[in-house]
Amino acid sequence: MVVQKRIPVAVNKSLDRYFQEKILNVFDHICQLCFIKDDTVTVHHIITRKCKSLRHDARNGVPLCVHCHTYAHKEPSDFRTWASGWLQRNYCIAYEDLKRLSNQ
């Protein structure tokens, strides 16, 4: 059994900021669902950020505006279907494969 050490909060916050900026810069701060570009665009974790193995994995982050981010949380099944195609187009990985990585 592998014992995982907790990452200090300050380090986690720093990694979160780096993760967010990296994803936003790659996609030019454009919402990947409605293609709006404005300062409400943030990064949504496709697989929950509680999953430590994928929390800072670039394949697990998608830029969404505030409206699309709300949609992702309110309609998780529909969002999962959309995210599956998005993952395939942008990272050549299936949602199921990303989900499998979260279980390792």
Image (cartoon, rainbow, N blue to C red):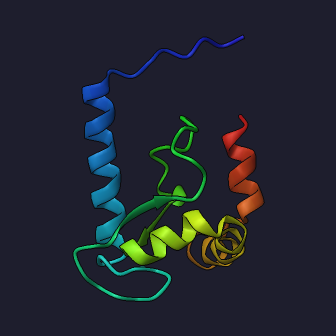
Q: Residue visible at 28% across and 37% down? A: 13
Q: In this view, does 36 lie above or below 75?
A: below
Q: Residue visible at 32% across and 72% down? A: 41
Quadrant occupied by the N terminus: top right
Which of the pair 87/67 is nearer the observer? 67
Q: Is residue 103 above or below residue 39?
A: above
Instruction: Find residue 37 and report its image quarter.
Output: bottom left
Q: In this view, does 48 lie above or below 27?
A: above
Quadrant occupied by the C terminus: top right
Q: Where is residue 82 in the image (x, y as percent from the top left)?
A: 66, 77
Identity of the residue furthest to the bottom in this view? 35
Q: Residue visible at 41% across and 89% down? A: 35
Q: Position of residue 39 (x, y in %)?
A: 22, 75
Q: Where is residue 11 in the image (x, y as percent from the top left)?
A: 28, 29
Q: On the rendered structure, is 97 left or right of 19?
A: right
Q: On the rendered structure, is 38 left or right of 78?
A: left
Q: Residue visible at 51% across and 44% down? A: 49
Instruction: Find residue 84 and report its image quarter.
Output: bottom right
Q: Is residue 94 above or below residue 67?
A: above
Q: On the rendered structure, is 25 left or right of 45?
A: left
Disc count in the image? 0
